[in-house]
Amino acid sequence: MKKPKLFRSRILIACIVIAVAYFCIRFFATQSKINADQAELDRLNAEYESLVAENAEMQDRLLKGQDADNFEKAAREQYGYVYPDEKVYVVAP
């Protein structure tokens, strides 16, 4: 009569140990993923801040008119924009 009770308690202890080991492994795997995701988030936030600063600098330069000539040149050459009262002549070969 003692053997089945002892056998059941050993099985119960083995199941508990396996469950605890499983949950520990899952916990550390999840923590590792959280740390990796946090590092990626920090990298993306730094990149975002850099782009916001670059955008603000470009807007300041545009408002001050420093790059107006460059923008005008790009608009004319790349997109074919002209002023409303401007006449454009195209030389045909």
Image: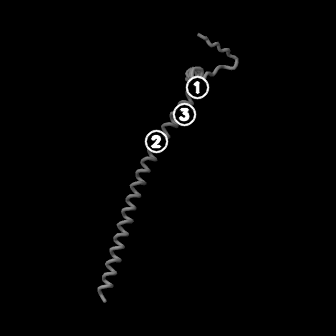
On screen, residue 18 versus residue 49, left or right, reads left
Mark number for residue 64? Answer: 1
> Percent from the top left, x then y, of residue 88?
65, 15
Image quarter of the N terminus: bottom left
The tag earlier along the polypeptide, 1 or 3, is 3
Residue at left offset 54%, top offset 33% = 56
| Picture layout, residue 68 above or below residue 52 | above
Image quarter of the C terminus: top right
Using the image as rendered, state which of residue 88 and residue 58 is in the foreground. Answer: 88
Q: Which residue is mark 2?
A: 46
Within 10 angstroms of label 3, few (less than 14), some, or many (20 or more) residues? few
Asked which secondary structure carries label 3, the reply is helix
Using the image as rendered, state which of residue 24 and residue 65 is in the foreground. Answer: 24
> Percent from the top left, x then y, of residue 59?
57, 31
Q: Amino acid at mark 1?
A: Lys
Residue 76, picture quadrant: top right
- The CA distance from mark 1 to mark 2 is 27 Å
| Picture layout, residue 3 above or below residue 26 | below
On screen, residue 79 versus residue 47, left or right, reads right
Mark number for residue 45? Answer: none
Asked which secondary structure carries label 1, the reply is helix
Residue 74, picture quadrant: top right
Q: Amino acid at mark 2?
A: Ala
Q: Amino acid at mark 3?
A: Ala
Q: Which residue is mark 3?
A: 56
Residue found at the very far right of the displayed protein: 85
The tag earlier along the polypeptide, 2 or 3, is 2
Residue at left offset 39%, top offset 55% = 32
